[in-house]
Image: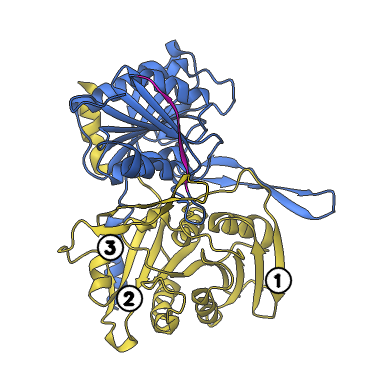
Chain colours: A blue, B yellow
Amino acid sequence: MTIEQNDRLILLTNDDGLYASGLKTLMEVMEEFGKVVLVSTLESMSGMSQALTVKTPLRVKLLEETDRRRVYACNGTPTDSIKLAVNQLLERMPDWVVSGINHGANASVSVLYSGTMAAAIEGCLYGIDSVGFSLNDFSRNADFSVCRKYIRLVMQKLSSHSLPKGICLNVNIPSVPENEIKGIMICRQAKGNWKEEFEKRKDPMGKTYYWLTGMFQNQEPDAVDTDEWALANGYVSVVPVSVDMTAHWYISSLKEQFSE
Amino acid sequence: MTIEQNDRLILLTNDDGLYASGLKTLMEVMEEFGKVVLVSTLESMSGMSQALTVKTPLRVKLLEETDRRRVYACNGTPTDSIKLAVNQLLERMPDWVVSGINHGANASVSVLYSGTMAAAIEGCLYGIDSVGFSLNDFSRNADFSVCRKYIRLVMQKLSSHSLPKGICLNVNIPSVPENEIKGIMICRQAKGNWKEEFEKRKDPMGKTYYWLTGMFQNQEPDAVDTDEWALANGYVSVVPVSVDMTAHWYISSLKEQFSE
């Protein structure tokens, strides 16, 4: 694949691994928009957040190349994949970083744990227009076809409106038949947390171990401007995510406290 | 150790492992404030961000117990440590989650990659007053004694002013002699990014591998209200960090774009 200056170059990754069907769908839609370089892992990297691989060396292998796409496997996290691509694999900066489609929603505080969204955030830190897509269905036989229409819509908007520096998009798609989706809702991250987060077991030696599990609890189920509300009510949620985590509104109160 | 209702219960962790000298200093200062439960790993977990362990079982071992402290080793990330403590190890919710002292600063966008700050963010998601401390010195023989005074000062403020829901503190301490520290500065996260992020090598089989490395680049070195400026000018930086990553100010623009 040769990348010409006027080609749109799209860097693609996910956190469910190269064989995930959500990634296949996203790849197909992205090929309508430009030339695609895919860098991801063979295994799932769910829940890896913005983690970096610092203790083991990273390796990359070119698996496939056509005139429209290039596919690399690497052994790092989604964030490593984006860093490797931008610094070592690509001839020039990509125009877009697109991540997903995640098996399972990344609404509310899941944005903090999500490898899918971490890849979009990483792209955003490089100043690249970046989007993460997730389908609200954790099952391995989830139907991603419903996502195509809304991925196209979001990326068409992005074609005409570049994002401001330091902002990427978190797009979650409800798992309902396409004709039941009511449209796109621009919203904010819902306040929420996880409960009953471990399953305690005994191994064959009688020693205790724990599996991470748990249930999400929406702390504001009645608020109609959140991503959780949008998903629960048949809308595609689009949240602008800021890489600046400063709680700007609280700076003046802190200054007062510390000057006492 | 028995935990009475009127004891201040402090949950402590870090991402440099149980033998890090930054953790030792923080433990000593925290014991002045209350009863301490420490949960951390034997090995370093630097750069793990908010990562969760979902593919391997978690194990915990009680290493030490006195009338003032309890020390557990676990095999998870800093986020796992906080979740395990809150859900499985503690008799009741802790009053504070305190993390660090990290070997190396976690200013600017490092907050996104830091395991130390992830632990504080996790505490914050549970509604607990949470703080992450870092010293701007990566070396293993860093002198953490300079931190004591400022850790005390921050925690004294926290004793009288609880944090709002959804906000924790990111405290970075400059690596200069104590008499050269000019005081505490409440500030915002500086805009920045990393450059030249990999070292490319050949293994003995002739195969290429990469080590993550890189240099931080401050995109706004002249702005005087950032954590990077504070550190570079001899101040302790205190940034209020929000778990809500929504770029609220950009919602109306996005709504307009999507209604076109």
- Residue B132: say if magenta: no
- On the rendered structure, is B60 left or right of A28? right
Q: Residue at coordinates 25% horizontally, 82% vertically from top-left? A: B182
The span from disc 3 to disc 2 (Cα, nearest Å) is: 20 Å
Determine which residue is flagged by label 2. Answer: B174
The amino acid marked with disc number 1 is Leu
Which element is circle 1 on? strand
Letter of the chain that mark 1 sits on in the rendering: B
Q: Residue at coordinates 41% horizontally, 80% vertically from top-left? A: B147
Q: Quadrant of residue A6?
A: top left
Q: Which residues are magenta?
A: A58-66
Any part of residue B9 in sight: yes
Whole-percent x, y for residue B77 in the image: 56, 56
Q: Which mark is residue A251?
A: 3
Magenta: main secondary structure:
strand
Determine which residue is flagged by label 1. Answer: B63
- Residue A65: say if magenta: yes
Q: Is residue B56 above or below residue A161?
A: below
Q: Residue at coordinates 60% horizontally, 63% vertically from top-left? A: B41
Please name which of the two marks, 3 or 2, marks the residue nearer to the observer: 2
Report whether mark 3 lies on the same chain as mark 1: no
Task: Point out the residue furthest to the top here.
Answer: A179
Category of crowding for the residue at label 2, using alpha-carbon neighbours closer than 10 angstroms: few (below 14), some (14–19), many (at least 20): many
Q: Is residue B242 above or below residue A21?
A: below
- On the rendered structure, is A4 left or right of B95? left
Quadrant placement of the N terminus of chain A: top left
Which element is circle 2 on? loop
Q: Residue at coordinates 61% horizontally, 44% vertically from top-left? A: B54
